Image (tube, rainbow, N blue to C red):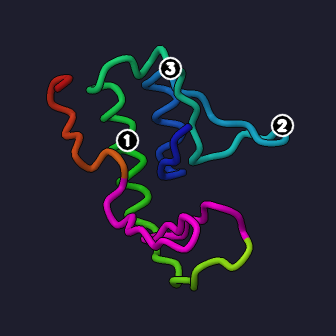
Amino acid sequence: MVRVDPASSDSLVATTRAHLLEMRGRPMQGWLRVDTGDVRTKRQLAEWVQLGAAYARSLPLKPMIDAPRSSGPLSVSPGVAWVGSVRLSTSRLPGDHLDGRGDG
């Protein structure tokens, strides 16, 4: 599953093997399902990660929150993840190191 610019959803569905994600029977613009067979290589995965990361970076930042008091072992907000009482920075999105060139 990858979140992309909703304005790009129809174009991506038409030009790739991705499908619009359905939630409660409704197609969700901006949310795509990419089958595992379509991300077998690092290059294929990097392309989708880059699309999702670019859209995530375009969204406005949400305000920081204090450490959760009773929400379980893991809590994430934009830029911060809490594991227990440990604060982790998530300012770099997963896949930032992937440049889409080759599989290495």
In the image, what residue occupies the spot 42% across and 56% down?
55
Q: What are the residue bounds of the magenta stretch?
A: 71-93
Q: Which residue is mark 2?
A: 25
What is the CA distance from the residue labelled 3 to the residue labelled 1?
A: 13 Å
- Point out residue 53 in the picture as x, y percentages from the top left corner: 38, 52
Q: Earlier in the sequence, mark 3 or mark 1?
A: 3
The amino acid type of the residue labelled 3 equals: Thr
Query: Mark 2 packing: few (<14 Cα in 10 Å), some, or many (20+)?
Result: few
- Point out residue 2 in the picture as x, y percentages from the top left corner: 51, 41
**Element type at mark 3:** helix
- Measured along the vertical axis of the image, is residue 15 above or below residue 65? above
In the image, what residue occupies the spot 84% across and 41% down?
24
Query: Mark 3 packing: few (<14 Cα in 10 Å), some, or many (20+)?
Result: few
Q: Nearer the viewer, residue 52 or 103?
A: 103
Q: Which residue is mark 3?
A: 36
Between label 2 and label 3, give the one nearer the viewer: 3
- Measured along the vertical axis of the image, is residue 30 above or below residue 79? above
Indicate yes or no whether the magenta region holds residue 90: yes
- Asked which quadrant contains residue 95, the reply is top left
Q: Which residue is mark 1?
A: 49
